[in-house]
Amino acid sequence: MKLFLKQQVPFILMYVLLSILLIGMVWLDGYRKTVVLLYGFFLAGFILCLFIGFVYLTQRNLYQTLSRKRKKNVYEEIDKDVSPLSQSINELLQCQYQRYFNEIKQLQNARDEHTRFINQWVHQMKTPLAVIELMMQDEELDRDSLIEETDRMKEGLALALSMARLESFQQDFVIEQVNLKCLANQAVADHKRNFIRNYVYPKITIDEALEVKTDEKWLSFIVYQIISNAIKYSAMSEKTIDISAKQAFGKIHLIITDHGRGIAKSDLPRVFQAFFTGDQGREHHEATGMGLYLVHEIAQELNHSVEIESEVGIGTRVSIIF
């Protein structure tokens, strides 16, 4: 009630001031019937009181809710009022509530996703560490096996680092002209031991003059991850992984094709989902299901798109479209 009365003070003061001015003008004009003037003053005041009372009754729940120190069931209480002001405030609160609810839900999902990834990542890192410990117990240390396990750890660390940096992507990218052939050569060089170890061979057919506007560091991660998957799922096949590029309809396509096991048709719509490994991933216990998810997310941030075509037993074709 106090809050309501405070809001009505300007209206009451305005009424008194206008009434004094009006009576003063009539008085100075020569009309001297005091009783009539007072009657008009109090009649207008009575009408003003009725109006204020009506406003209070229609907005009572709103002002009572605003006056409480602890506000519970705010939406239900305000919704009981039929006045336009109460309904407008209720709509505004509902919109704000929905907005903050969505934001909180997104944060919770991101936290759950991050926690799940870290749990899986820690579990995956235990495997190479256990293998290294076993090798350390042997008198003769297998150098090639040691390098293989350390490479796995490096890939896992790179994946975790990219996952962490993705949250602050807007502060961590630079758009520049990037030569696709140079970038592909570097990605193949980074995978050199992986190619040799798995008996697959890279084949690059990209025009040396072909360039795109992108962030070189993030695009390198995308290409590295796709090549890593291509090697993993065509291991021991003694076939090539083709890396090519073409221009079509004003767009540039960077295409990475392997001739490995392929992806089941039922799995294709879900390959970019977080933690999805599919039939092939379940055969490779080190798969986290986060590689292609990060590829898709980073490509979207860079305003590129990624498309996958695959057939079981024939191979997989991944296109990065600029």
Image (cartoon, rainbow, N blue to C red):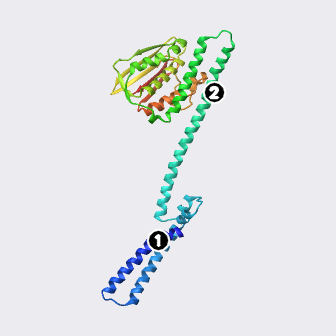
- Which of 266 and 213 lies nearest the eye of the viewer? 213
Please say whether residue 278 is visible from this viewpoint. Answer: yes
State the SS at label 1: helix
Q: Relative to residue 143, is residue 174 drawn left or right?
A: left
The answer to whether one can see residue 236 in this image is no
- The residue at the point 46 percent across, 60 percent down is 88
The residue that disc 1 covers is 8
Q: Amino acid at mark 1?
A: Gln
Residue 236, relative to residue 94: is it above or below? above
Residue 259: image location, x then y, percent: 49, 16
* Residue 317 spot, x, y in % from top left: 46, 22
Task: Inspect the image, locate mark 2, and give the three-letter code of the amino acid beneath it.
Answer: His
Q: Of residues 292 and 178, which is closer to you in this image?
A: 178
**Observer-nearest of 147 and 305:** 147
- Position of 24 with respect to 173 (left or right) is left
Disc 2: which residue: 123
